[in-house]
Amino acid sequence: MIGTASVVAGLSLWQLVAASGRLDATSFPTTSRIAGAGVGLLANRPFWSALGHTAESWALGLLIATVIAIPAGLMIGSNRFLFASTRVVVEFLKPIPVVAILPLALLMFGTTIKMKLLLVAYGALWPLLIQTTYGAHDVDPVVADTARAFRLSYPRRLGFVVLPSAAPFVATGLRLAAVHAFVITIVAELVAGGQGLGLMMFMSDNALRYADTYALAFIAGLLGLSLNFVLQRLERLSLHWHSSQRIEG
Amino acid sequence: MKGRRRALAIEIWLPVSLLVIWWFATKNGSFLEFPPVRLIFERFREEYFFGRFSSDVLPSLVHLALGYGIAATLGVAGGLVIATVPWAEAAASPYVHFFRALPPPAIVPISIILLGLGVTMKTSIIVLGAVWPILLNTIDGVRGLDGTLLETARACQLGRRYRLTHVIAPGAAPQIMTGLRSGLQISILLMAVSEMVASTNGIGYLLLLSQQQFLIADLWAGMIYLGLLGYLLNALFNVGERVVLKWHFGARVGGAL
């Protein structure tokens, strides 16, 4: 109740301030003009094709990161030698901001989707790898020994014993990676000029169509919100079988 | 002793071999994108410690420190106030969640529209991006506090100010630190992004400039500089966190006795 009222109040205040003419009308458009610009965007093809480009790089980059990070994380986490060997490298590479490698990606691939994928996959890799490693580290030793006593092959042990046990960590890692991948996709478009919503935002800014810029930022926020919502739901739904989600009777 | 040496060997064999491979694979300069390591470090020393230090490195660090400092102050103080005033939390929560979900770089074009190109814009971008995770985590941290603890503090007739600084803030500290860490990462990202998109100086500007002029060794030097900056600030943060939370855990153990 209070939440809705507060949103309505905020938007009306914006409208009143912008319409009062105290501020420059081009750089601070009214909410109604921004909403109009938003509707105009949604009705046109360029927006949907930009959204498609953004979604494509996000999904493919996340997929590449998943294919690398989950098996690697399971192996590293369940093996003490690998864990100790890779610790320094992971600890060093993890806090490096993705924008640091952006110019290199741009140099190697230009403004192509390959450039975006390199950045998105690199950025999404670390949260997923680290969470999966923690999860695989946590496997019940009795379960691990039992699987070995039954002579399950290494890939099977990873897939059917370590992975299910690490699932909650993997799910958290996936959620973090998915959000991070979205942010990096926008960076790769806004800064490096890859096709997509970020580039559209940059172009509307340059073309002085400021209402479009505001509308696009608003849409990006809504996309981020729905992404968070869907991921949290999925996490809860897909883990109902795991002991961490079960309520003891 | 022998065991410890063995453990150390296991820890460092991989990073050392990676560095050696990097050194020898690029030694002849046969790959355009991967210049010799020696050359990179030469450029690194000349550009980032001497030539560009006061013109580009220092301004970036000042924007970062200012922006992050303001975001941390606003986020923690605002979060404590919002979480302890019942209606304020309901009123603020749609905004906090929206801006937390908005990809931080999306703020950049709007800040340029409103604030132009300058120090104010670059600092404001950092504040506007980093404040939300700090605010959100502070609110969540206060909300997650044990109800009995708060009621005990009230029953002991502790004043509102005293409760805030001695009961609520320390209790929420672990989660506040989580928010501050993610705010720091966003700050570094936005510092570089704002300089890449709209600036004529700074680390981000230098990086894109060397890419456009095909000064590959300079580009690598900049990448390593930005990477080291991220690494060192994170390490510094870890030290700070240990200091803050050590006191917190110590207080909790004492309280339990």
Image: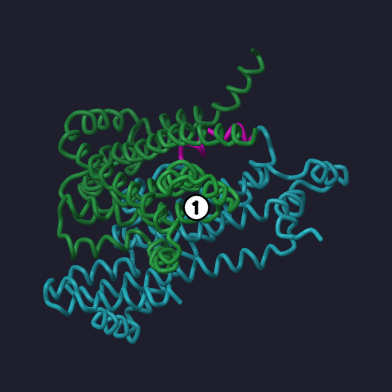
Position in image of residue B192 (x %, y %): 29, 49
**Nearer-the-camera pick, B25 or A218:** A218
- Name the residue beneath numbered marker 1: B142
Picture colour for chain B: green
Q: Which residues are magenta?
A: A82-93
* Residue A194, above or below B11: below
Picture colour for chain A: cyan
Q: Is residue B46 magenta?
A: no
Q: Residue at x 41, y 46 (%)?
A: B180
Q: Is residue A234 left or right of residue A93?
A: right
Position in image of residue A197 (x %, y %): 34, 70
**Can residue A114 be spotted in the picture?**
no
Q: Residue at x 46, y 36 (%)?
A: B241
Q: Quadrant of the N terminus of chain B?
A: top right
Q: Is residue A87 magenta?
A: yes
Q: Residue at x 24, y 63 (%)?
A: B109
